[in-house]
Image: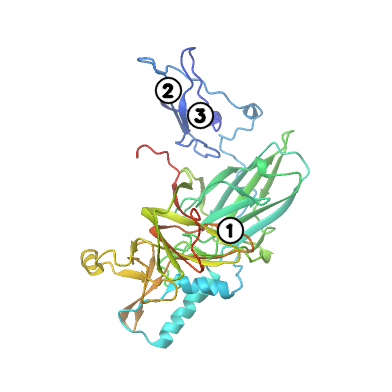
Amino acid sequence: MQNNIRPYALVRLCLLPMTMFASAPEHLRCEFLSEPLGLDCPAPHCSGQVADTRTSARQITYQVPLAAWAKQGAVPGLPDTTAWKHSVWITSDVQVPMDDFTRSWQEAALLDFASQKKAEPQELDAWYRHAHEDLATARSPVVFGKTFALDKPVTAATLRISGLGYFHARINGVEAGDFALAPNFTHYDAEARFLTLDVSKLLRAGENRIEVTVAHGRLRELPGRMAKYIYRETPVLRAELSITHPKGGVTKIGTDPSWQAGFGPVRQAGFWVGEAYDATAKPGGWQPAEVAKNFAPAMHADDLPPQRIVRELDPVAVTQPQPGVWVYDFGRMTAGKARVQVPPNASVTIRYANLLHGDIDKQKVRQISHSPFIVYPSGTDRENPGMIRPMYRCTCPVVIMRKGKPSLMEWGYADCVRSVAAPLDYHATFDYTGYRYVEITGLDKQLPVGAVKALEICNDLPRTAG
């Protein structure tokens, strides 16, 4: 059964059977979503499955009850004519101070491979300098924050939000939403997707604080000055917090220059590069946010299920190719990130790969696929690598010209993590890659069983088989 039902029947959809024999329908969906909060579709499709074991049973009619708040004129299913009238796009070029930890991540993420043609040392040094400058500035996620007070009780609260490239929001220190990477990717110059989150339980009487960390994600497609296409150099955020009070009053809090911008524990992040996470770093660098100029994409609700952690995999084997290097084999390819229980006061580097060194004849594969292979250095011994993977799979190659001839340098893929005096349950927030193997360095002994898992991340669509 699938029907067009007018928007006023939306959000809390419940199809009721009209006979005493029928049971309640199952798998209710609106626009294919089980939780269709904040849809802006003018004629949404609603569907459900009849759960009746009787022979030739069929549905002949249905009833859609409206929630109590709908009778008061507050109908979330209808397009909100006041949406986005209380906010603007904001941005900031706040820069994370450089330190030894951030530099170590840059060295791990920027792998230098022998080029086909030798470059002049001064040219190479200049390229490295520009690349490091870009990593140090344009790759720093921005934390946008605002403190506000509530002197009235809260009946309901929703947060409409779009942070580009990817965002994570926290209200009073609690994560808002259970997604991994949001919003879904679009052509940002033309369209930006937003999410609507129910944050009623996160607010409290008195002082409240909302903080949104926004990383470049795919807003800046490639690292360095050799980027093929860049939408914007700095992350952008637009959000509106709508708070309903018991007697019908509504408080709106939207992004504007009164918000502050700074930095947090995610010191550097790149969708194609990896992440540097320093739990010992204190938030700081606060300065007023700026209105994002020359940026006005159309705003549409994200009608795809968000990307979530849908499965955790345990390693099937652990090897130690050399001292201080552990390689975890998860038995099959997956896509997402690794979750690692980092010990107290530790600095760990996490790398990802598809193949182990020696698994295949690289020369034969190169002849068939025309794809050269990258050999990851394990620890500090470049002569004894542990893992390899094709150059054009889950890495970002940058081809530059030296005196009219092609010369290749390569961006690697690494997450660097530093913990405080307590264990840290870590997985990267703003990047994603395909892999089978995870390499961990920086520790003097192997992590215990269960401390390393593979997180499979994808759009949370219902499984139909397998």
Residue at x-position 45% and y-position 84%: 125
Seen as rendered, the residue at the extreme top is: 20
Q: Amino acid at mark 2?
A: Val
Q: Secondary structure at mark 3?
A: loop
Q: Say which of marks 1 and 3 sits in front.
A: 1
Q: CA distance from mark 2 to mark 1?
A: 46 Å
- Residue drawn at (26%, 64%), measured in percent from left and top? 360
Identify the element where label 1 is drawn: strand
Q: Are marks 1 and 3 in contact (CB under 8 Å)?
A: no
Q: What residue did someone put label 2 on?
A: 50
Q: Is residue 336 above or below residue 31?
A: below
Mark 1 or 3, nearer chain start: 3
**Where does label 1 land, which residue?**
424
* Residue 188 shows up from this direction: no
What amino acid does circle 3 point to? Answer: Arg
Q: Residues within 10 Å of mark 3 (few under 14, many from 20)?
A: some
Q: Which residue is mark 3?
A: 6
The kind of residue on which mark 1 rests is Leu
Residue 292, given in percent of the width and then of the height, sits at: 58, 61
